Image (spheres, rainbow, N blue to C red):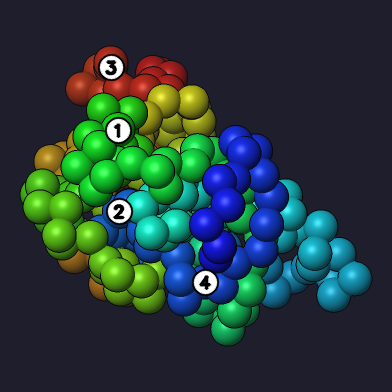
């Protein structure tokens, strides 16, 4: 990228290899579902599909593009071998210092440096590429529990992590095969509808 400041809402295309995650983890089963969804798109509608799921970024110092939404989509497209994808600029902070940039990102809840065990890590632990994000099966569990009707999608900072941490406390693994994951999903939907989950974003109840 050049040195020109990008207006909020700018749309452009960027190499996946240059995008930096603001999360350490993704749920790889959820990624695989998005890979399947992408594969099902007719070739003549693929560009419109990409545009609909355009990756949201914040431009940081040195004009680095930091992904702040749709980490699962961008990892899915990386796994499928796409190299250039559409992005949507939420904010251009390229004129800030590193400290000012991270102060803004943390204050606005635009970065979530928690590992696959739900433990907070230093910002230096953030992967340097989309390919470096690690698998957290509880992030897949929360995604499929929502799809199954366990709770509603809401616009709030990181509701998926809050549900993943709830399920991490309530449901033990393993989830390494389809049978174990299916059983864990049934337990997750039940737990999501229980009084224990009251207060979590998107809670439905019985």
Give the CA distance from mark 4 to mark 2: 15 Å
Foreground label between 3 and 1:
1
Could you tell whether 52 is left or right of 110 in the image? right
Give the CA distance from mark 4 to mark 3: 38 Å
Give the CA distance from mark 1 to mark 4: 24 Å
Q: Which residue sits at x=54%, y=39%?
A: 90
Kindly check if marks 4 and 3 are in contact, taking CB atoms under 8 A apart as contact.
no
Residue carrying label 3? 198
Foreground label between 4 and 2:
4
Residue carrying label 1? 104
Q: Which residue sits at x=52%, y=57%?
A: 3
Describe the element under mark 4 as helix, strand or loop.
Answer: helix
Foreground label between 4 and 3:
4
Q: Which residue sits at x=28%, y=16%?
A: 199
Q: Quadrant of residue 103?
A: top left
Is 198 above or below relative to 92? Answer: above
Residue carrying label 2? 23
Q: Quadrant of residue 14?
A: bottom right
Q: Mark number for residue 16?
A: 4
Describe the element under mark 2 as helix, strand or loop.
Answer: loop
- Percent position of residue 102, x then y: 24, 42
């Amino acid at each position: 990228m050049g040195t020109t400041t990008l207006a909020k809402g700018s749309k452009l295309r960027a190499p996946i290899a240059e995008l930096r995650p603001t999360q350490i983890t993704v749920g790889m089963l959820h990624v695989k579902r998005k890979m399947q969804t992408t594969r099902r798109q007719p070739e003549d509608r693929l560009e419109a599909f990409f545009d609909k799921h355009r990756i949201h970024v914040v431009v940081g110092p040195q004009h680095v593009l930091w992904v702040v939404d749709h980490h699962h989509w961008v990892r899915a497209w990386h796994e499928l071998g796409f190299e250039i994808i559409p992005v949507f600029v939420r904010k251009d902070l390229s004129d800030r210092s590193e400290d000012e940039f991270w102060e803004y990102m943390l204050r606005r809840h635009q970065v979530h440096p928690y590992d696959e065990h739900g433990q907070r890590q230093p910002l230096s632990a953030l992967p340097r590429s989309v390919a470096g994000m690690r698998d957290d099966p509880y992030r897949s569990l929360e995604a499929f529990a929502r799809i199954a009707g366990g709770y509603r999608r809401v616009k709030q900072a990181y509701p998926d992590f809050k549900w993943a941490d709830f399920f991490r406390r309530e449901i033990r693994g393993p989830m390494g095969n389809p049978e174990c994951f299916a059983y864990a999903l049934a337990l997750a939907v039940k737990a999501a509808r229980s009084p224990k989950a009251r207060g979590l974003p998107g809670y439905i109840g019985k």
